[in-house]
Image (tube, grey):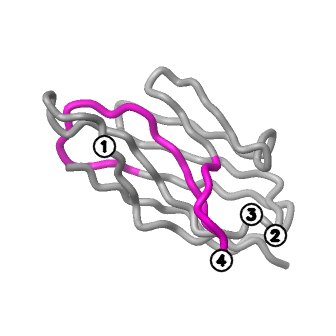
């Protein structure tokens, strides 16, 4: 099974930057996409950014041009560089990975516990 651990959240002023990291551990046959979701208080969880195993990326319109997702496949890690942060970026950020635990199993989603990002002056 896959375990995901996020780090890098915290308090930052508007216009500032943060870099989130997520490390995957455990045994699995293959890992496909990795992504960052976020959930603001009182709102539904939404996709912020996703990166495929081939390196293709996609972003929510609200973060395009400000956030950059990257991954290190050798380390089974994914990162989210967040620049020009706004108060509306305040949320719990969750790491997500789609992985196949065994060769004869389908792809399954895995989630981290989340890391809080607060953008406030």
Mark 2 vs mark 4, foreground winner is 4
Image quadrant where one finds the C terminus: bottom right
Residues marked 2 and 3 touching at CB (< 8 Å): yes
Q: Which residues are magenta?
A: 23-48
Are there few (<14), some (14-19), or many (20+) residues within 10 Å of tag 1? some
Mark 3 vs mark 1, foreground winner is 1
Residue corresponding to mark 1: 108
Are there few (<14), some (14-19), or many (20+) residues within 10 Å of tag 3? many
Task: Specify the farthest residue to the top.
Answer: 54
Q: Earlier in the sequence, mark 4 or mark 1?
A: 4
Residue corresponding to mark 4: 41
Q: Position of residue 36 (x, y in %)?
A: 55, 50
Please say if 111 is above or below 27. below
Q: Earlier in the sequence, mark 4 or mark 3?
A: 4
Q: CA distance from mark 2 to mark 4?
A: 12 Å
**Point 50% across, 52% down: residue:** 21
Q: CA distance from mark 2 to mark 3?
A: 5 Å
Classify mark 3: helix, strand or loop. Answer: helix
Left or right side of 82 for 27? left
Q: CA distance from mark 4 to mark 1?
A: 27 Å
Location of residue 105 (image quadrant): top left
Q: Earlier in the sequence, mark 3 or mark 1?
A: 3
Residues marked 4 and 3 touching at CB (< 8 Å): no
Residue corresponding to mark 3: 89
Classify mark 2: helix, strand or loop. Answer: helix
Q: Nearer the viewer, residue 59 or 23?
A: 59
């Amino acid at each position: 099974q896959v375990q995901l651990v996020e780090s890098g959240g915290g308090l930052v002023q508007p216009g500032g930057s943060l870099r989130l990291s997520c490390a995957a551990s455990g045994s699995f046959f293959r890992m496909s996409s990795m992504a960052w979701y976020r959930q603001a208080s009182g709102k539904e969880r939404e996709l912020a950014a996703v990166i495929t195993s081939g390196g293709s990326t996609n972003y929510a319109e609200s973060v395009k041009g400000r956030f950059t997702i990257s991954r290190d496949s050798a380390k089974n890690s994914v990162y989210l560089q967040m620049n020009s942060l706004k108060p509306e970026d305040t949320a719990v950020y969750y790491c997500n990975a789609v992985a196949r635990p065994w060769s004869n199993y389908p792809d399954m989603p895995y989630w981290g516990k989340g890391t809080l990002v607060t953008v406030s002056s």
